Amino acid sequence: MDTELLKDALPKIVTELPGPQAQALIERRSTAIPATIACGYPCVIARGAGAMLEDVDGNIFLDWVGGVGVLNLGYSHPKVVAAVSEQALRYFHGMMNIVTHQPYIALAEQMNRIVPTRSTPRQTMFANSGAEAIENAVKLARGATGRPNILVFNGAFHGRTLMAVHMTGKRAYSEGLGPFPDGVYRVDFPYLYRRPEGMSEEEAVRYYLTRLEDALLQASPPAQTAAFVLEPVQGEGGFIPAPFAWVEGLRALCDRHGILLIADEIQTGFARSGKMFVSNWWAEGGFAPDIITSAKSIAAGLPLSAVTASQELFDSLPPGLLGGTYGGNPLACVAGLEVIAAIERDGLCERSAEIAERARAAFSSWQEEFEQLGDVRGIGGMLGMEFVKSRVSKEPDAALVTAIVKHAAQRGLLVEAAGIYGNVLRFLSPLVITDLQLEAGLSILHDTIAQLTARA
């Protein structure tokens, strides 16, 4: 199927999964690639367009994983393809520590315009991955404050490099990899669905704010604390949004003690939340962060990440301390410019809000229908559904979610699990999804849940 037809297609499975060609490639993969780079999906991509992908056997899937938030703009956006192709004819590479190239400057200018850090004027540096952005944000915070410690949150995911995986709350990503870098301390995140029994949400917000105060008393004193680092919506942790009232209190705490606030918007950025960044919502409330890291959908799938902060913070570091061979690659930068242009031109922040409204309405109605669906939550088009064995005990039902993911894939819908207990389904539909594709995906997911819960 050609790209234009694929963009508007609906899920269609024409072979047993995995199909014969996919099975042969999966077998080659098992020989050539370490099993620790795990994959549980029965498809091998041949091409992608919009929210859809076609595998090597002609099966067509609706992709609600999108590289875990990389494809807000979908597969094979024509303007991104054209821009990258044009740049490839000029030069592939230019290292900004050696030669200056225009795409890096142009994208940094756009990022400085759209990224809502508290202080201005802003500056932006580029790296390759979200983990690299986190590493550089930590360097910046430590260098600017002269303080060694970083406070992070239970349930967080910040990457797979040694520092970033130590900052990550899910021990499955770091088991057996220590010893880890010093100076990382962990505190409770406001997981309101699992708040202490008997507390209202308002009381819970106050409770979790006291946990922050406790951390500064018992773990890392303010004079030794460079920054708090948090995801505005915890991704791997279970699509748990940070309550705005709690973020406002965290911001005030940081201000009292001269601590920086770093927002890890690697998954939440680029229109996913209904605004360009969740930090735009925070800025409107008067509690914008000092440093914002971004990646994933920044360049439509090319390796690129960014750290944006005030010039004052960056100027606190000596020349040459930051940089890297491939950071801000010209091909990735021109892709990033087209991503920002497309989001603004095509109204994808507004489209994210529309998708979220329809998806949340469906998920909320399912919550009434299925006893096992305990919670629906998120911000904008980043929604999670938490499944439990009992709404009273809230005992996680990871087995049900695993089965939903497996059975949905067999029907042509790719969804992914999340959560510290593995019992959350995440919704990360590309923002270019058509209404018909959205309805098709909701129908597949509903029927899958209905079928599996009926067996329970």
Image (cartoon, rainbow, N blue to C red):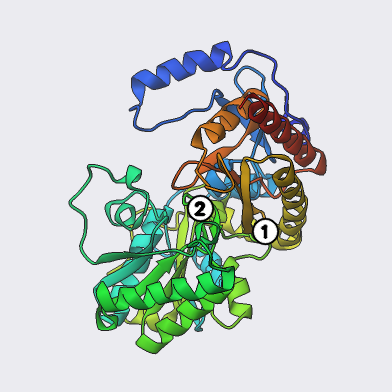
Please tell me how crowded label 1 is: few (under 14), some (14-19), or many (20+) other residues with Cα within 10 Å.
many
Q: Label 1 sits on what residue type? A: Gly
Q: Which residue is mark 2?
A: 235
Quick check: can you spot residue 288?
no
Q: Position of residue 138 (x, y in %)?
A: 33, 67
**Residue at which label 1 appears:** 380
Which residue lies most toward the top here?
20
Query: Can you tell which quarter of the image residue 274 is in?
Result: bottom right
**Mark sitting earlier along the chain (1/2):** 2
Q: Alpha carbon of mark 1 to alpha carbon of mark 2: how far? A: 13 Å
x and y percentages locating residue 141 in the rendered image: 34, 74
Can residue 248 be seen from the camera position used here? Answer: yes
Q: Where residue 173 sits in the image (x, y, percent)?
A: 34, 44
> Where residue 325 sits: x, y (%)?
34, 54
Horizontal arrangement in the rendering, residue 170 relative to residue 280 (left or right): left
Which secondary structure, mark 2?
loop
Residue projecting furthest to the right: 436
- Say which residue appears at 61% left-offset and 59% top-offset: 270
Hey, which residue is sitting farthest left in the picture?
A: 179
143 or 378: nearer the eye? 378
Which SS class for mark 1?
loop
Q: Residue at x 40, y 60 (%)?
A: 133
CB contact under 8 Å: marks 1 and 2: no
* 366 in relation to 202, above or below: above
Q: Is residue 27 left or right of residue 57?
A: left
